Every structure is written in structure tokens, then in C-alpha cells.
Amino acid sequence: MSEQNLPLTCSVVVTGQLRMPEMLLQSVRSWMAQSREGLISRVIVVTWQEEAHQFPELCSKLEQHGVELLTPPMPPVRGIGHVWPQTLALVRGLELLADEDAWVLKTRADLSISPPFLRSLLETPGY
């Protein structure tokens, strides 16, 4: 298989509140299955200390699944719609990937992405 036909490697950065723990765990399980196939390289969850303290069991389960968990303190300035904390969370997650050559899927803890759809994106040359 030529280099351009190889599947892409993707890191996943999840940001924000841990609103739907079961949905996040379901997503993490599918990403870890895709990780074993070489499609997903890393899964990083960036949430605030306050969120992590509200969901200690979830955070423990995430780490048991191999998720890298970042929990900085919530910034004092939030902005309209919490734009500053959201942007800062993404930046924190991307900082961990600065030296890597992979695509990044940025998502939220309360969204689910179809595993077959993600697979098709990563396995389709030139997509």
C-alpha cells in the first residue's frame, strides 16, 4: 500500500463539561477500539477541575481506558457563551499534540460520532 493510501492517524481532543458521562464513555470505548486498529493515536479530555471533582468516577474510568485527562482550573474570565474557557481547553489539548503529525478530531463530551463515519473519513484516501 502506498503512503498516500495508508489510513490517517487521528488524535481526539474532547473539551468542555462532562454533561453526559455514559455518552462520553461509549465514545471513548469506540475510539479505543479504533486505537487498537491504528486509526486513533491518542484521546485527550480537557475539562475543568470543578467538573472533574463533580465526576470522580467518570474521570477514573476514562483514565482506565487510556484517556489522557487534563483538569486545569476554570479561568476567571469566561466571556459570552464561555468562549474563553472553550478556546483555552482546545489550546491545552493541542499543546499535547504539538510534535505529532496526525489529524485532530475536536469534539465535546456530549456529542457522539458514528464509528463507521469516523472510520470512513480516516480510511478514504484524499478525503
Image (cartoon, rainbow, N blue to C red):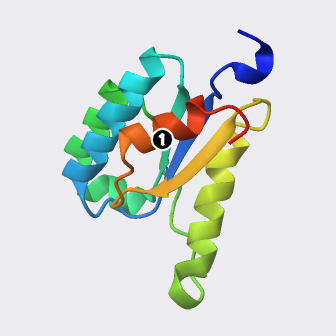
Residue on which the image places disc 1:
118
Q: Closest to the observer: 44 or 117? A: 117
Q: Quadrant of the C terminus?
A: top right
User: How many numbered discs?
Assistant: 1
Mark 1: few/some/many CA within 10 Å (<14, 14-19, 20+): some
Whether 108 is drawn above or below 67: the answer is: below
Residue 30 in picture, x, y percent from top left: 33, 33
Q: Closest to the observer: 122 or 87? A: 122
- In the rendered image, which quarter is residue 4 located in? top right
Residue 18 relative to residue 13: left or right: left
Callout 1, which amino acid?
A: Leu
Q: Closest to the observer: 4 or 36? A: 4
Whether 91 is drawn above or below 120: the answer is: below
Residue 31 in picture, x, y percent from top left: 40, 33
Name the residue rendered at 25%, 41% in the picture: 26
Residue 27 in picture, x, y percent from top left: 33, 42
Q: Quadrant of the N terminus?
A: top right
Residue 90 in picture, x, y percent from top left: 62, 57
Label 1: element kind: helix
- In the rendered image, which quarter is residue 50 located in? bottom left
Name the residue rendered at 75%, 29% in the picture: 100
